Image: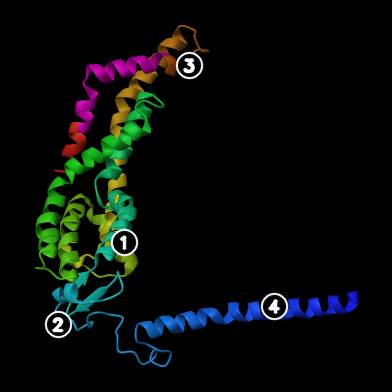
């Protein structure tokens, strides 16, 4: 009797399990079908529905200004038609971040920053002060002096290139040409002829008659070499009075028999005193800035 009851119980439990699984699997489909029936749609009408997913038609762009009226789904778009392009906000941010990453390169290669930093380094070494002024102060001073010296150039770029481009008066090609022209004029005024000739000969370019004939790829490295040469010449001139002080102090110490005392220990205070009494910062920075005019 117990075996028969146990067998019947197993069959009932198995039947109940099958019913539960079947109800669980098919109940979402029935509910979904009921929902579709509630809104007047069936499974057959899903594929052939006339309700669009886009409220308005995309349309076509006749001019770059028509982009603002188009119903597009992407947030990054570029249009280029007859050299008259329009950039979306996301792309403008991307280009801005890219330029920010490249600004240090442009700052070093195409402005007065390199000459100022090298001269400041020579001055600190000539004074004998290893960490005064610190690197942060030298870099900050060089940055502000660069902005002061390059202000006329940056003003020309803003007035002749940036503002007309934002107003839609220039194409992208014209914008880049007008933006680089003031920088080329600045670099050409500080570049020696023999340095330009050197890179023209390396490239195999013939003789040039004006600035417009010199490619930017030639002018930039020639400008860098000229800046290094000028900075080293200024550094050598700065070294001369401090070397004289070192030689005098070393001779006096040797005459007094104090050969174990490092001459820099005695000469450094004298060099700092001479630099302060002569108003060295005004003389060095003033004449350094005047070299660019």
Residue designated by label 2 = 62
Residue designated by label 1 = 94
Q: Which type of secondary structure does the marked residue at label 4 adopt?
A: helix
Q: Which residue occupies the extreme front position in the image? A: 1
Q: Looking at the rendering, in which quadrant would you find the N terminus?
A: bottom right
- Tell me whether circle 4 and circle 2 mark residues in contact (CB < 8 Å): no
Residue 170 lies left or right of residue 147; in this view the side is left
Residue designated by label 4 = 16
- Relative vertical location of residue 110 with respect to residue 266 in this rendering, above or below: below
Give the x, y percent position of residue 206: 25, 70
Which image quadrant is residue 204 in? bottom left
Q: Which type of secondary structure does the marked residue at label 2 adopt?
A: loop
Residue designated by label 3 = 262
Which of label 4 and label 2 is nearer to you? Answer: 4
User: Magenta segment, which residues?
Assistant: 266-285
Q: Residue at x 22, y 19 (%)?
A: 278
Q: Which type of secondary structure does the marked residue at label 3 adopt?
A: loop
Which of label 3 and label 1 is nearer to you? Answer: 1
């Amino acid at each position: 009797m117990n075996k028969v009851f146990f067998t019947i119980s197993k069959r009932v439990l198995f039947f109940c399990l099958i019913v539960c699984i079947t109800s669980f699997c098919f109940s979402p489909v029935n509910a979904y079908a009921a929902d579709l029936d509630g809104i007047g749609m069936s499974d057959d009408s899903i594929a052939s529905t006339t309700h669009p997913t886009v409220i308005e038609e995309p349309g076509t762009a006749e001019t770059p200004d028509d982009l603002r009226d188009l119903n597009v789904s992407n947030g990054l778009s570029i249009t280029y038609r007859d050299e008259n392009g329009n950039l979306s906000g996301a792309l403008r941010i991307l280009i801005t971040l890219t330029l920010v990453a490249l600004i240090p390169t442009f700052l070093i290669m195409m402005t007065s920053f390199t000459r100022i930093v090298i001269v400041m380094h020579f001055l600190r070494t000539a004074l004998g002060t290893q960490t005064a002024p610190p690197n942060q102060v030298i870099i900050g001073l060089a940055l502000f002096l660069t902005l002061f010296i390059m202000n006329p150039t940056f003003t020309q770029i803003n007035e002749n290139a940036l503002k007309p481009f934002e107003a839609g008066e220039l194409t992208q090609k014209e914008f880049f040409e007008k933006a680089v022209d003031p920088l080329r004029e600045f670099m050409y005024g500080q570049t020696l002829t023999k340095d330009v000739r050197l890179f023209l000969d390396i490239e195999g370019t013939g003789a040039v008659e004006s600035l417009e004939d010199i490619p930017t790829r030639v002018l930039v490295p020639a400008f860098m070499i000229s800046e290094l040469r000028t900075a080293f010449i200024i550094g050598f001139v700065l070294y001369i009075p401090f070397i004289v002080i070192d030689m005098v102090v070393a001779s006096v110490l040797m005459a007094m028999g104090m050969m174990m005392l490092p001459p820099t220990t005695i000469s450094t205070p004298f060099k700092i005193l001479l630099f302060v009494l002569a108003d060295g910062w005004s003389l060095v920075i003033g004449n350094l800035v005047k070299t660019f005019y």
